[in-house]
Image: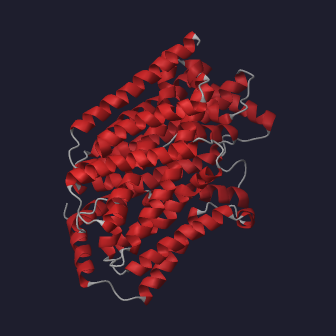
Amino acid sequence: MSEEHAFQLAAIVVYLIGMLVIGYYAYRRTKTGRDFLLAGRDLSPRVAALSAGASDMSGWLLMGLPGALYATGLIEAWIAIGLTLGTWLNWMIVAPRLRVYSEITSDSITMPAFFEFRFRDRTRLIRSVSAIIILVFFVFYVASMMVASGAFFESAFGWNYMTGVLVVGGVTLTYTAFGGFLGASLTDVAQGLLMMAALVSVPIIATIQLGGPGRVVSLIDEADIQVGLDHLSFTGGGLSWASMLVIISGLAWGLGYFGQPHILARFFAIRSHSDVKTARRIGTGWVILCMGGAVLTGLIGVAWFHEAGQPLDNPETVFLLLSQTLFHPFVAGLVLAAVIASIMSTMSSQLLVSASALVEDIYGLFKHDPGEKQQLWLGRLAVVVVTIIAILIAQDPDSTVLDLVGFAWAGFGAAFGPMILMSLYWKRVTAMGALAGMIAGAAVSYIWGTVPAIKETIDLYEIIPGVIAHFVIAIIVSRLTKKPDPEVAEEFEQMRETVSSK
């Protein structure tokens, strides 16, 4: 192993040990099943905000987004703008009401449970169907994170692919299974700060090295003349039907936030709805800094590698190669650790939401009110089971089941996002309306994203037709079915009064 790789690996080892230490601290404070699944609903606004952000952003933030900007230009930045707006709106219109309403509705600690109690669904179909959707999608999602970690160690250090999978999977499993929701949230904070530091420092130092912003812009222009692109145009060089679809699809990514179970879990867990305003400012600020850093890294990479006369074969390596060029190997190793952090923070949250779906929503259908200790150990067992299944799937990095991950963000957004909004803002929505809308949203989103004839005709992000279908079907079915019980209206008004009285 070279000296450079030795320094980088040492930095990653330090990072992994730090995650285990945080996990041990959380383990000492996790005593009950409620603690394990939702940290006792006592997260501070800072922890909730940074945890929500870090658990949302996987390796895509440090590799995929900078790579897209390097390859295409600012037209890809509309995704970052959409996600930033979605983050702010989610904290603004969903978080305070969901925190209050979930407590009013039998103190629900999972999204499927909230839906069941909110809609008085005596058939239990909403809870079981939504739990199954969460479990299936997140198993594949976790597997994709493991594939990414295996590929990372394979390319960065020449390790065997499965060794990388087992190292990252093993560390994440350990601090998640023992530290529970608190462990995942506290490690998310450390991982989120590491990601932010890396994404802010790389473009700043690269710009200084190149001679300032003016020099960067001129180098990008020179590179564009050679390849016939316009990296500095938000419309890709001209407004057309195709570019409009790209812009609309990019902004539509923000719609997905309203239905992501691992993000909404932070709204359940925050200490009080009065803390949401502070969390919103912290969370939105973190996203702005990280998204801005990722966008600038991709653009500055165009200038850097043009001047070096070495265009990249793989655009997604732009962030990693810049960091390895700019920093001492140990510091570069910490930047590489930020990539691992982005993977692990997402994976741990998905493991916990999957465990919650298994223990609270599926096992809970057959055995009511398990004891606190039993719930705690069932939660830990569920994390282990989901991890093992994901590792088995991840043995084949080209496994076709992983293609489903590309639809998970849109699938969750279309299946759950409109239902969340209607449950919080429209008391007339019924259980059957919610169930029909959930199924319609998920189905339309999946069909739109997988049928080639549709994609070739209108290349629009599938979350848009999925969300529209969900709203239309839910409203029609709710109007055609019996009004909800009077207690639903009473709880709705109680929630609204509590939120408005803060």
Q: Hey, which residue is sitting farthest top in the picture?
A: 3
Instruction: Report the front residue among 355 and 44.
Output: 355
Q: In the picture, which quadrant includes the C terminus?
A: bottom left
Residue ID at (35%, 37%): 175
Residue 500, image quadrant: bottom left
Instruction: Report the front residue among 451 and 46.
Output: 451
Instruction: Report the front residue among 356 and 118.
Output: 356
Residue 382, placed above or below residue 241: above
Residue 377, placed above or below residue 482: above
Residue 94, image quadrant: bottom left
Q: Position of residue 103 (x, y in %)?
A: 23, 63
How many callouts does the rendering have?
0
Q: In the picture, which quadrant includes the N terminus?
A: top right
Residue 378, placed above or below residue 323: below
Residue ID at (73%, 32%): 313
Residue 400 can be seen, yes or no:
yes
Q: Position of residue 84 (x, y in %)?
A: 47, 49
Q: Position of residue 210 (x, y in %)?
A: 62, 21
Determine whether, in the image, residue 55 is placed left or right of residue 107: right
Determine whether, in the image, residue 81 is placed left or right of residue 16: right
